[in-house]
Amino acid sequence: MKAMSYARYGGAEVLERTEQPVPKVSPGSVLVRVRAAGVNPVDWKIMAGHLDQIMDVTFPVVPGWDVAGVVEAVGLDTPEFEVGDEVYSYGRRDTVHGGTFAELVALPASAVSRKPVSLGWEEAAGLPLTGLTALRTLDALRLTGGETILVHNGSGGVGRTAVQLAVHAGARVIATASAKNHARLRELGAEPVEYGDGLAGRVRALAPDGADAVADFAGGVLETTLAVLKDGGRHASIADGSVSGQGGRYVWVRPDARELDRLSALVDAGTLTVDVSATYPMEEAAAAFAASMSGHGGGKIVLSEFSS
Protein backbone atom coordinates (compact mmCIF):
# COMPACT_ATOMS: atom_id res chain seq x y z
CA MET A 1 0.00 0.00 0.00
CA LYS A 2 1.01 3.62 -0.52
CA ALA A 3 2.11 5.47 2.62
CA MET A 4 4.17 8.37 3.87
CA SER A 5 6.91 7.20 6.22
CA TYR A 6 10.31 7.97 7.70
CA ALA A 7 13.18 5.64 8.61
CA ARG A 8 15.05 7.97 10.98
CA TYR A 9 14.42 10.97 13.18
CA GLY A 10 14.60 14.42 11.64
CA GLY A 11 12.65 17.21 10.02
CA ALA A 12 10.35 17.19 7.02
CA GLU A 13 13.24 16.02 4.83
CA VAL A 14 13.03 12.47 6.26
CA LEU A 15 9.39 12.03 5.22
CA GLU A 16 8.89 10.21 1.90
CA ARG A 17 6.37 8.23 -0.05
CA THR A 18 6.95 4.50 0.30
CA GLU A 19 5.26 1.16 -0.24
CA GLN A 20 4.37 -0.59 3.02
CA PRO A 21 2.78 -3.98 3.75
CA VAL A 22 -0.98 -4.01 4.24
CA PRO A 23 -1.54 -4.23 8.02
CA LYS A 24 -2.79 -7.50 9.47
CA VAL A 25 -6.27 -7.48 10.99
CA SER A 26 -6.04 -8.93 14.49
CA PRO A 27 -9.17 -10.40 16.15
CA GLY A 28 -10.09 -7.20 17.99
CA SER A 29 -9.30 -4.70 15.24
CA VAL A 30 -10.70 -3.20 12.06
CA LEU A 31 -8.91 -2.35 8.83
CA VAL A 32 -9.84 1.15 7.65
CA ARG A 33 -9.39 2.52 4.15
CA VAL A 34 -8.26 6.07 4.81
CA ARG A 35 -10.23 8.93 3.28
CA ALA A 36 -8.61 11.70 5.35
CA ALA A 37 -6.06 11.99 8.17
CA GLY A 38 -5.62 14.82 10.63
CA VAL A 39 -2.24 16.49 11.12
CA ASN A 40 -1.29 17.29 14.72
CA PRO A 41 1.85 18.85 16.23
CA VAL A 42 2.57 15.58 18.03
CA ASP A 43 3.14 13.92 14.64
CA TRP A 44 6.16 16.02 13.73
CA LYS A 45 7.38 16.15 17.34
CA ILE A 46 7.59 12.36 17.34
CA MET A 47 9.36 12.49 13.96
CA ALA A 48 11.95 14.83 15.51
CA GLY A 49 12.55 12.38 18.36
CA HIS A 50 11.01 14.49 21.10
CA LEU A 51 8.90 11.68 22.59
CA ASP A 52 11.39 8.81 22.43
CA GLN A 53 11.75 8.76 26.22
CA ILE A 54 8.10 7.81 26.73
CA MET A 55 7.15 5.95 23.53
CA ASP A 56 8.81 3.05 21.73
CA VAL A 57 9.42 3.66 18.03
CA THR A 58 9.78 0.97 15.36
CA PHE A 59 11.16 2.22 12.04
CA PRO A 60 9.97 2.76 9.42
CA VAL A 61 7.26 4.91 10.97
CA VAL A 62 4.03 5.82 9.21
CA PRO A 63 2.96 8.93 11.16
CA GLY A 64 -0.55 10.04 12.04
CA TRP A 65 -3.04 9.25 14.79
CA ASP A 66 -6.26 10.85 13.47
CA VAL A 67 -8.27 9.23 10.69
CA ALA A 68 -11.63 9.10 8.97
CA GLY A 69 -12.44 6.35 6.52
CA VAL A 70 -14.38 3.23 5.56
CA VAL A 71 -14.09 -0.19 7.18
CA GLU A 72 -12.32 -2.49 4.71
CA ALA A 73 -12.17 -5.62 6.87
CA VAL A 74 -13.02 -6.69 10.41
CA GLY A 75 -11.28 -8.98 12.86
CA LEU A 76 -12.73 -12.19 14.23
CA ASP A 77 -13.96 -10.46 17.40
CA THR A 78 -15.42 -7.16 16.16
CA PRO A 79 -19.20 -7.69 15.92
CA GLU A 80 -19.83 -3.95 16.35
CA PHE A 81 -18.52 -3.13 12.85
CA GLU A 82 -19.17 -4.26 9.31
CA VAL A 83 -17.37 -3.75 6.03
CA GLY A 84 -18.50 -0.42 4.58
CA ASP A 85 -19.10 1.38 7.88
CA GLU A 86 -17.96 5.01 7.87
CA VAL A 87 -15.78 5.55 10.93
CA TYR A 88 -13.26 7.83 12.56
CA SER A 89 -10.67 7.37 15.26
CA TYR A 90 -7.87 8.67 17.41
CA GLY A 91 -5.63 5.71 16.75
CA ARG A 92 -2.64 6.22 19.03
CA ARG A 93 -0.76 3.07 19.98
CA ASP A 94 1.82 2.62 22.73
CA THR A 95 4.37 1.78 20.01
CA VAL A 96 4.84 4.25 17.17
CA HIS A 97 4.92 2.45 13.84
CA GLY A 98 1.82 2.04 11.67
CA GLY A 99 -0.07 5.34 11.55
CA THR A 100 -2.80 6.92 9.49
CA PHE A 101 -0.78 8.58 6.70
CA ALA A 102 -1.40 5.54 4.52
CA GLU A 103 -4.04 4.02 2.29
CA LEU A 104 -4.97 1.51 5.00
CA VAL A 105 -4.59 1.41 8.77
CA ALA A 106 -5.50 -1.28 11.31
CA LEU A 107 -6.98 0.04 14.55
CA PRO A 108 -8.29 -1.48 17.79
CA ALA A 109 -12.08 -1.58 17.68
CA SER A 110 -12.12 0.07 21.11
CA ALA A 111 -10.67 3.23 19.54
CA VAL A 112 -13.03 3.40 16.55
CA SER A 113 -16.37 5.19 16.40
CA ARG A 114 -18.90 5.80 13.66
CA LYS A 115 -18.28 9.06 11.84
CA PRO A 116 -20.68 11.91 12.62
CA VAL A 117 -23.15 11.95 9.75
CA SER A 118 -23.03 15.74 9.49
CA LEU A 119 -19.25 15.92 8.93
CA GLY A 120 -17.32 15.45 5.72
CA TRP A 121 -14.21 13.29 5.65
CA GLU A 122 -11.76 16.14 6.20
CA GLU A 123 -13.72 17.63 9.09
CA ALA A 124 -14.14 14.23 10.73
CA ALA A 125 -10.40 13.53 10.46
CA GLY A 126 -9.68 16.84 12.17
CA LEU A 127 -11.74 16.14 15.26
CA PRO A 128 -10.54 13.05 17.21
CA LEU A 129 -7.34 14.16 18.99
CA THR A 130 -8.34 17.79 19.46
CA GLY A 131 -11.89 16.88 20.45
CA LEU A 132 -10.91 14.19 22.93
CA THR A 133 -8.24 16.44 24.43
CA ALA A 134 -10.67 19.31 24.93
CA LEU A 135 -13.31 16.97 26.35
CA ARG A 136 -10.90 15.34 28.79
CA THR A 137 -9.58 18.73 29.93
CA LEU A 138 -13.02 20.16 30.64
CA ASP A 139 -14.05 16.94 32.39
CA ALA A 140 -10.96 17.31 34.60
CA LEU A 141 -11.98 20.90 35.40
CA ARG A 142 -15.54 19.86 36.36
CA LEU A 143 -16.88 22.97 34.67
CA THR A 144 -20.48 23.91 35.48
CA GLY A 145 -22.97 26.44 34.20
CA GLY A 146 -22.49 30.02 35.36
CA GLU A 147 -18.75 29.66 35.93
CA THR A 148 -16.06 31.65 34.15
CA ILE A 149 -13.26 29.84 32.34
CA LEU A 150 -10.13 31.24 30.71
CA VAL A 151 -8.94 29.26 27.69
CA HIS A 152 -5.32 29.83 26.69
CA ASN A 153 -4.84 29.50 22.91
CA GLY A 154 -8.54 29.55 22.20
CA SER A 155 -7.98 29.78 18.45
CA GLY A 156 -6.01 26.51 18.18
CA GLY A 157 -7.65 23.22 17.27
CA VAL A 158 -8.06 22.08 20.87
CA GLY A 159 -8.94 25.56 22.04
CA ARG A 160 -11.75 26.09 19.55
CA THR A 161 -13.29 22.78 20.54
CA ALA A 162 -12.94 23.57 24.25
CA VAL A 163 -14.58 26.97 23.75
CA GLN A 164 -17.61 25.33 22.18
CA LEU A 165 -17.83 22.64 24.84
CA ALA A 166 -17.57 25.22 27.63
CA VAL A 167 -20.24 27.43 26.06
CA HIS A 168 -22.46 24.37 25.74
CA ALA A 169 -21.91 23.70 29.46
CA GLY A 170 -23.27 27.17 30.21
CA ALA A 171 -19.96 28.78 31.20
CA ARG A 172 -18.72 32.26 30.42
CA VAL A 173 -15.65 31.79 28.22
CA ILE A 174 -12.69 34.16 27.92
CA ALA A 175 -10.19 32.98 25.32
CA THR A 176 -6.76 34.20 24.29
CA ALA A 177 -5.87 34.61 20.62
CA SER A 178 -4.23 36.97 18.18
CA ALA A 179 -6.46 39.76 16.89
CA LYS A 180 -7.05 38.09 13.52
CA ASN A 181 -8.84 35.20 15.27
CA HIS A 182 -11.05 37.27 17.57
CA ALA A 183 -14.02 37.38 15.21
CA ARG A 184 -14.18 33.59 14.95
CA LEU A 185 -13.98 33.22 18.73
CA ARG A 186 -16.88 35.63 19.15
CA GLU A 187 -18.89 33.52 16.69
CA LEU A 188 -18.19 30.50 18.87
CA GLY A 189 -19.44 32.33 21.96
CA ALA A 190 -16.20 33.43 23.62
CA GLU A 191 -14.88 36.82 24.72
CA PRO A 192 -11.46 37.08 23.04
CA VAL A 193 -8.41 38.76 24.58
CA GLU A 194 -4.99 39.38 23.04
CA TYR A 195 -2.28 37.15 24.46
CA GLY A 196 1.16 38.46 25.47
CA ASP A 197 2.43 40.96 28.03
CA GLY A 198 -0.28 42.28 30.32
CA LEU A 199 -2.62 39.36 29.72
CA ALA A 200 -3.52 38.92 33.38
CA GLY A 201 -4.62 42.55 33.59
CA ARG A 202 -6.77 42.23 30.47
CA VAL A 203 -8.45 39.12 31.86
CA ARG A 204 -9.04 40.79 35.24
CA ALA A 205 -10.60 43.75 33.44
CA LEU A 206 -13.19 41.37 31.99
CA ALA A 207 -13.53 39.24 35.13
CA PRO A 208 -12.56 41.29 38.20
CA ASP A 209 -13.37 38.42 40.56
CA GLY A 210 -11.14 36.05 38.61
CA ALA A 211 -11.74 32.81 36.74
CA ASP A 212 -13.25 29.70 38.26
CA ALA A 213 -11.21 27.53 35.89
CA VAL A 214 -8.34 27.86 33.42
CA ALA A 215 -7.58 25.52 30.51
CA ASP A 216 -4.04 25.86 29.16
CA PHE A 217 -3.57 24.73 25.57
CA ALA A 218 -0.49 26.88 25.00
CA GLY A 219 2.18 26.27 27.66
CA GLY A 220 4.37 28.86 29.33
CA VAL A 221 1.40 30.66 30.90
CA LEU A 222 1.34 29.26 34.43
CA GLU A 223 2.13 32.63 36.04
CA THR A 224 -0.84 34.22 34.28
CA THR A 225 -3.08 31.28 35.14
CA LEU A 226 -2.34 31.60 38.85
CA ALA A 227 -2.73 35.39 38.72
CA VAL A 228 -6.29 35.22 37.36
CA LEU A 229 -7.52 32.10 39.14
CA LYS A 230 -9.96 32.49 42.01
CA ASP A 231 -9.08 31.01 45.39
CA GLY A 232 -10.10 27.38 45.13
CA GLY A 233 -10.25 27.57 41.33
CA ARG A 234 -9.21 24.66 39.09
CA HIS A 235 -6.68 24.63 36.30
CA ALA A 236 -5.37 22.09 33.80
CA SER A 237 -2.79 22.05 31.03
CA ILE A 238 -1.93 19.85 28.06
CA ALA A 239 1.37 21.65 27.50
CA ASP A 240 2.97 22.23 30.91
CA GLY A 241 3.60 19.34 33.28
CA SER A 242 4.66 21.70 36.06
CA VAL A 243 1.00 22.56 36.76
CA SER A 244 0.80 19.37 38.81
CA GLY A 245 3.03 21.01 41.41
CA GLN A 246 0.75 24.05 41.55
CA GLY A 247 -2.53 22.31 42.24
CA GLY A 248 -3.37 21.77 38.58
CA ARG A 249 -3.96 18.76 36.37
CA TYR A 250 -1.67 17.71 33.52
CA VAL A 251 -3.81 16.13 30.80
CA TRP A 252 -2.77 13.42 28.33
CA VAL A 253 -5.60 11.97 26.27
CA ARG A 254 -6.16 8.29 25.49
CA PRO A 255 -8.02 6.61 22.59
CA ASP A 256 -11.63 5.94 23.58
CA ALA A 257 -14.51 5.20 21.19
CA ARG A 258 -17.11 6.00 23.86
CA GLU A 259 -15.74 9.51 24.25
CA LEU A 260 -15.74 9.90 20.47
CA ASP A 261 -19.41 8.95 20.58
CA ARG A 262 -19.98 11.88 22.95
CA LEU A 263 -18.34 14.22 20.46
CA SER A 264 -20.32 12.74 17.57
CA ALA A 265 -23.60 13.41 19.37
CA LEU A 266 -22.62 17.05 19.93
CA VAL A 267 -21.58 17.46 16.30
CA ASP A 268 -24.77 15.96 14.90
CA ALA A 269 -26.84 18.09 17.28
CA GLY A 270 -25.23 21.22 15.83
CA THR A 271 -23.43 22.07 19.08
CA LEU A 272 -19.88 21.42 17.88
CA THR A 273 -18.20 22.40 14.61
CA VAL A 274 -14.76 21.66 13.16
CA ASP A 275 -12.74 24.33 11.33
CA VAL A 276 -10.43 22.96 8.64
CA SER A 277 -7.95 25.61 7.53
CA ALA A 278 -6.02 23.63 4.91
CA THR A 279 -6.13 20.30 3.10
CA TYR A 280 -3.11 18.68 1.44
CA PRO A 281 -2.77 15.54 -0.69
CA MET A 282 -1.13 12.72 1.24
CA GLU A 283 2.05 13.05 -0.82
CA GLU A 284 2.42 16.66 0.37
CA ALA A 285 2.57 15.65 4.04
CA ALA A 286 5.89 17.49 4.43
CA ALA A 287 4.21 20.76 3.41
CA ALA A 288 1.37 20.03 5.83
CA PHE A 289 3.92 19.52 8.62
CA ALA A 290 5.57 22.82 7.72
CA ALA A 291 2.21 24.59 7.97
CA SER A 292 1.55 22.95 11.32
CA MET A 293 4.98 23.96 12.61
CA SER A 294 4.27 27.59 11.72
CA GLY A 295 1.51 27.62 14.32
CA HIS A 296 -0.69 29.99 12.35
CA GLY A 297 -3.13 27.64 10.65
CA GLY A 298 -6.29 29.10 12.21
CA GLY A 299 -7.90 25.64 12.18
CA LYS A 300 -7.17 22.00 11.51
CA ILE A 301 -4.75 20.80 8.83
CA VAL A 302 -5.81 17.60 7.09
CA LEU A 303 -4.42 15.17 4.51
CA SER A 304 -6.62 13.66 1.80
CA GLU A 305 -6.31 11.93 -1.60
CA PHE A 306 -4.94 8.65 -0.29
CA SER A 307 -5.90 6.31 -3.12
CA SER A 308 -4.42 6.31 -6.60
Image (cartoon, helix red, strand yellow):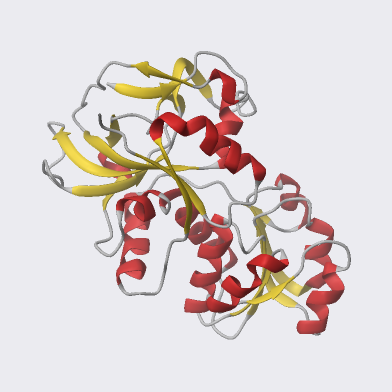
Query: x and y percent of residue 252 in the render?
Result: 56, 46
Q: Position of residue 67 (x, y in %)?
A: 35, 42
> In the image, residue 178 lies at what x, y percent?
72, 64
In the image, is residue 209 above or below residue 23? below
Is residue 205 positioned above or below 213 on the image? below
Q: Nearer the viewer, residue 93 or 160?
A: 160
Q: Which residue corresponds to the image point at 82% horizontal and 63% vertical from the top-left?
A: 224
Q: Residue 81 at x, y = what percent? A: 15, 45
Position of 34 with respect to 242 (left or right) is left
Q: Residue at x 52, y 38 (%)?
A: 288
Point out the image quarter for the C terminus: top left
Where is residue 52, by image quadrant? top right
Q: Quadrant of the N terminus?
A: top left
Q: Would residue 171 appear left or right of 105 to someone viewing this image?
A: right
> For the image shown, how many numbered marks are present on the structure?
0
Residue at 55% in and 36% down: 289
Q: Nearer the viewer, residue 151 or 246?
A: 151
Q: Nearer the viewer, residue 21 or 89?
A: 21
